[in-house]
Image (cartoon, grey):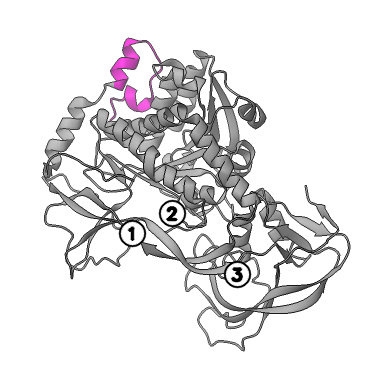
Amino acid sequence: MQSTQTPGAIWRRMALTGVILSLAIMTGGTALAQNLPRTGAEAAQWSRHTTHEELVEYLFEVQSMSDNMLVQQLTTTAEGRGVYMVILGDPPTATPGTAWFSGKPTVFIVQNVHGGELSGREGGLLLIRDLALGQLKPLLKDVNVLIIPSINPDGANRQPRPTRSNSLGYDMNRDYVVMETREISTVVEDVLTQWWPDVHIDTHNGGSRPYNLTYQTTLHPSADRDMIDLANGPMFEAVRDHMESEGLKFFFYSGARQDQETGEWWWGTTEPLLRKQHSYSGFQNMIALLYECPGGYPLELQARAQKEGQVGLLRYVAANAGLVRSTIMEARRRTLAREQTDVVLSVERSEYPQDYEFYVREGGRQPGMQREAGARREVGQQSEVEYKLVTGKLGTLYLPAETRTRPWAYAFDGNLYKIADLLRRHAIEVEKLTHPVTTTVERYRVESAEYAASTYQNHVLATVEVEVFEEEITLPAGTYLVRTGQNGGTLAAYLLEPDTDDSLVTWNFLDHVRLSGATIRGERETPGTALPIYRIINQVGVRAILLP
């Protein structure tokens, strides 16, 4: 990766906003002059966001004028609103199979997973119009584009103001493991594991000013390294160059931190949890990108920043289709071949060796905001704020902290059908033994367990420590089997190892098993419970039926 060089040492925030606003394209005026459909926000001169009813009408208006656009309703929310996916191509491909037959890479963009974060929603509507009817239409000869303009219409249309969660109180960007919301279920089951896009973008409002858009790819070291390097290197640089050509500032997510003892600056980010989009799609061998637009800017400028960030990415993918597809296909081949020999159980934060230049608030962080503190967002006020350019490390690198050898397969008790069902929903291949097999396995003995003191996504998460021990056993007919030599092998291993952050033990799928030490706030019990999940290290001969 290259360091980001930006001229000037100090910017005044109000001046920055004025410069960028003066450069902004008057999208509403352009659409009006060309007699094209306008979004509700454009019609209201950006005084409010587009309502759900206006969004749906706009999609069908644009479609009626284009031969390159299909509209599919994926699901209906708890409050009865449709969740729509726009399929764009030249020609548009109505099924995943025809998308693969086209030979073109596919980019999947999900807007507005957090209802109150509307920049991607508004920017995505502008992008749809320009791809279907405007100057971006030639891109569709080289790339297929799938866009969900609002995955959380209930949250976006909540009164008196939009909410982060959906109408049932779920943070849907924490639902990629258990898929308890119908919205994320359709993203995973109907799009990600059917279309198998090469790139998956999720848009938000976050990051730090004076940047107009911040960017992050998969952080978890379980994901393929070549995918991460492509996204952090040439792909990032291409999007940055496009943004800067539009007068917009672009950098990594999320913000600057300063070590209070040494005075050194570094750029930090979020945690690489599987339950989030930017980790989940990486585990599924896709280039996952997080687009975060800092708050405080006018809605029109936020929409434009999100749109141009997506345009820059599409231009790169279209121009480098062969490289993008070969990187993804090689990642999938390596997973099938089990070339990743270890399962990463936990990670530790690190940093890239080279120096980067980035903007920070003049005067730095407030006292007490130490390097080890979590991510802090720069929201900003309407008063003048000065920014200066500093040099520091990019602390967006995570390394394995604890690993365990990747087995040939996992097996688990035939009564655990809920686990088998969830794995199949993730497109993980699950078999069921038709005949017993006697073999040596590794098992997990729970040494300690503890439940969280409060609920999270309607769960009380469990944390366990286990001892792995060897035992020869006979697995009876009906036992479930999951081989790791499959596209979902890395994901399956992370879910089935009990002591990862997002294991199925963590998410309460084995709560009916008496976990030693597992009390909500009480005394620990006697350790020693053995979990009904088995690691088969070496290949054995089995007779089994693949589940549909």
Tell me, yes or no, whether the highlighted magenta stretch contains residue 30. Answer: yes
* Whole-number angstrom distance, CA of label 1 to CA of label 3: 28 Å
Image height of 282 relative to 101, above or below? below
Q: Secondary structure at mark 2?
A: loop
Image height of 54 relative to 83, above or below? above
Q: Residue at x 41, y 28 (%)?
A: 315
Lateral position of residue 502 relative to residue 384, left or right: right
The amino acid type of the residue labelled 2 equals Leu
Estimate the x, y position of residue 351 in percent, counting from the top left.
33, 59
Location of mark 3 (residue): 498
The amino acid type of the residue labelled 1 equals Glu
Estimate the x, y position of residue 189 in percent, counting from the top left.
63, 43
Location of mark 1 (residue): 351
Instruction: Report the span colored magenta.
Output: 27-47
- Circle on res. 219: 2
The amino acid type of the residue labelled 3 equals Pro
Residue 371 visible in the current orientation: yes
Estimate the x, y position of residue 521 in percent, counting from the top left.
50, 81
Q: Residue at x 38, y 20 (%)?
A: 38
Residue 162 visible in the current orientation: no
Q: Secondary structure at mark 1?
A: loop
Mark sitting earlier along the chain (1/2): 2
